[in-house]
Amino acid sequence: MPVTSLLAQAGPSLDPVSDLNQLTAYPFMVNALEAGTIVAVMAGLIGWFMVLRKQTFAGHTLSLMAFPGATGALLIGLSAAAGYFVFSGLAALLIGASAGGGAHRDRGQESAITGSVQAFGLACGFLFLSLYRGVLANYESLLFGSFLGITRGQVLALAVVAAAALALMALIGRPLLFASLDEGVARARGVPTRALGLAFLVMLGLAVAETAQITGALLVFALLVAPPATAQQITSRVGAGLVLSVLLGVLTAWLGLALAYFYGYPVGFYVTSVAFTMYVLARIARAAADRPTRLRVRAGSAGAGA
Amino acid sequence: MLAHEFFRNALLAGTLIALACGLVGYFVVLRAQVFAGDALSHVAFTGALGAAAAGIDPRIGLFAATIGVALVLGGIGRRAAADDVTIGIVFAWVLGLGVFFLAIFSTGSGGGNGLLGARELFGSIFGLSAADARIAALIAAGISVSVLAIARPLLFASIDPGVASTRNVPVRALGMAFLVLVGATAAEATQAVGALLLLGLLAAPAGAAQRLTANPYLALGLSAAMAVAAMWLGLAISYAIPSLPPSTAVIGIATLIYLLAFLLTTAPRRAPGPNASVREPAMGES
């Protein structure tokens, strides 16, 4: 049954215990699973707000800032992490500051600004790369991730970043939720919506940058968007949505890693496919669930319903 | 500068692609679909890799993938305008598929240089042959003409879809047709000049034009003119400074144009600021 895998003896049996034993037999897989879990939890929580605030494009742009960050740091001789933080932070500030806090956001201009920032950031990356004249060894893994080479130290670094991001979320979560759901009312009540929006984008940028250097920009983005969007299809309640988002994210990361381990194609492919399938199923279920309500409402308005 | 053939080719293809991007970009920004354009340019990557993995001409894969995904995005969203989240999820999955094709392609071609081979699928503007440049220019010209042909109803449908549909403007069909045009632009621009140039030329000149004027036709023309100007200036600068990649120079100029427009339009608006904030609660009460 199993396709020939890169790892000779690997192959899923239908016995979950032995599968789990196989998965955790190598330290690199344990590291990958831990890193995947940390990223999924963080992405599930932050992404829920990102999807609610309709800032998916901004999230994607920020995750791509890993490229100019890495090449710029390489050129100057700084550590890569410093480069990521500088570029993601700058991009987040630019997008957040120029987006405008007016009563009606101009979506067109906002998307134009985000697109320009992304293009300019990537252009800087190519410039740094050509000035460096060297070969950037992990160009591919920068975008698509190499989950399987994660060290203990990187897992710890991820845990620290995730803890900091989650602590900040706990601090600004309530007012941010208020500001995201009804900006006008929130501002009238004295909530600093603009500052909150900016703080959220900067935090999103920093968290995504740190994560992208370890797992790749694509993977972070997939985990940032799909599980929260699936959760919001299933429930509109805040607490349940956040929990569901985290659970779905962790499940996606584990399934993706396990599939990649057993069948030997890139992790990015499996994680995005699992995430996509979940979202499609949730949408179909939502559409099916919505139909009876519509019928009931019609019956009720006709006077035939109970 | 014009004595070199490679520069003439770049100028020919670049001018017409910039023109197409400026025209398409105006509507992309107006309809807040820059993310869709960005996604389609990445989809081109998957299409080309998929075709390469299957052993077909990459160009067929490019156009099939971008136009196919454009139709899907148009079909899912209400009023043929998919929301950010849908675009993001479809786009992440398509990129994941691209990684999958890359893995197949690099094992299939028997070497570890899969990405190197894949990168050859994506042109650099200074590396265009005369025939390539002519084809690119023709396709870009075709896209420009198509956009201009549907400009009037598309403008109506973009600004006020409700009224437009009561006036029998086919809002949904127009939205689909427009996304297909964006897809074709993405496929064309990606292989000729690279995905990076596409995004910058779609977003920045159009965004600047819409800040500078509220007149739609003027903004449309201004957007196209600024895109072409950014392309010319960028190519010239990059010719003068060889270590500066052409795409970086063009994007740099385009971003500068947007920055100038932003500063020009926000500086005077500061003055009536307090007035506007006084008027706001009054509108809420009425």
Image (cartoon, rainbow, N blue to C red):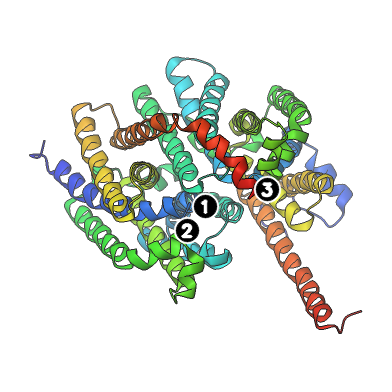
Q: Do the numbered discs 1 and 3 sit on residues whose CB atoms are within 8 Å?
A: no
Q: Position of residue A245 (x, y in %)?
A: 76, 47
Using the numbered discs, state the Cα–Cα distance from disc 2 to disc 3 in whole angstroms: 20 Å
* Position above or below: B29 against A37: below
Q: Position of residue B102 (x, y in %)?
A: 50, 50
The reply, left or right, for residue A161 in relation to residue B266 is: right
Q: Which residue is mark 2?
A: B50
Circle on res. A260? 3
- Circle 1: residue type: Gly
Q: Is residue A46 visible?
A: no
User: Chain letter of disc 1?
Assistant: B
Q: Residue furthest left?
A: B3
Residue under the image location 51 percent in, 26 percent down? A90
Classify 10 Å Cα crowding around label 1: few (below 14), some (14-19), many (20 and above): many
Classify 10 Å Cα crowding around label 3: few (below 14), some (14-19), many (20 and above): many
Q: Nearer the viewer, residue A141 or B241?
A: B241
- Circle 3: residue type: Ala
- Provide the secondary structure element on which disc 3 rests: helix
* Position above or below: B7 against B259: below
The reply, left or right, for residue A228 in relation to residue B123 is: right
Q: Earlier in the sequence, mark 1 or mark 2?
A: 2
Q: Is residue A29 visible?
A: yes
The reply, left or right, for residue B110 in relation to residue A174 is: left
Q: Position of residue A95 (x, y in %)?
A: 51, 34
Using the numbered discs, state the Cα–Cα distance from disc 1 to disc 3 in whole angstroms: 15 Å
Q: Do the numbered discs 1 and 2 sit on residues whose CB atoms are within 8 Å?
A: yes
Residue under the image location 38 percent in, 35 percent down? B265
